[in-house]
Amino acid sequence: MLMYQMLEADEWLITRNCVELIRTLPNLVRDNVRVEDIAKMDGDDTADAARYGLKSRQSRVSAENAPYEQRLAARVTSSDRTIRAIQARKAQIAEHYHGSPIHFARRLR
């Protein structure tokens, strides 16, 4: 369902070089028991991989759009005051570095 909804809403684009996915998608059948999954068949690995990627992206994007205080509160889970303080500080540091660019070490010649 998610794949088709995203395609219809132009939120997901499948490029021409995704040959296996393009070949596989039209042949998929929804699983009767697990509605968000497809019925198992030969060659469904590419569709499963695409679905996992879309689901992980969807949950990451919705978590990133949450307010700062809510993201911090989600990381502070202990009832112990000391552990809560440590978790809160770690969450603040992680939030600070989350928006920073990643620098890769330069190769020495």
Image (spheres, rainbow, N blue to C red):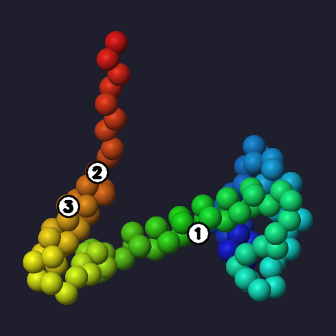
- Numbered label attached to residue 106: none
Residue position for label 3: 93
Q: Earlier in the sequence, mark 1 or mark 3?
A: 1
User: Which is nearer the eye, 21 or 37?
Assistant: 37
**76 with respect to 50 (left or right):** left
Residue 55 - label: 1
Per the image, label 3 sits on a secondary structure element best described as: helix
Q: CA distance from mark 3 to mark 2?
A: 11 Å
Q: Position of residue 50 (x, y in %)?
A: 67, 60
Mark 2 crowdedness (10 Å alpha carbons): few <14, some 14-19, many ≥20 = few
Percent from the top left, x then y, of residue 22? 82, 54
Q: Earlier in the sequence, mark 3 or mark 2?
A: 3
Foreground residue among 65 and 80:
80
Q: Secondary structure at mark 2?
A: loop
Residue 5 visible, this angle: no
Q: Is residue 108 left or right of residue 58?
A: left
Q: Which residue in the protein does label 2 denote?
A: 100
Q: Residue at x 14, y 70 (%)?
A: 86
Identify the residue at horizontal 31%, vertical 79% (top origin).
74
The answer to whether residue 75 is visible is: yes
User: In the image, what residue type sits under mark 1?
Assistant: Lys
> Callout 1: helix, strand or loop?
helix
**Residue found farthest to the top:** 109
Above-or-below relation of 17 to 87? above
Answer with left or right where residue 69 lies relative to residue 51.
left
Q: CA distance from mark 1 to mark 3?
A: 26 Å
For residue 14, above or below residue 90: above
Pointer 1 and pointer 2: residues touching (CB < 8 Å)? no
Q: Which residue type does callout 3 highlight?
A: Ile
Which residue is at a point 54% across and 66% down the rendered structure image?
A: 56
Quadrant assignment, res 11: bottom right
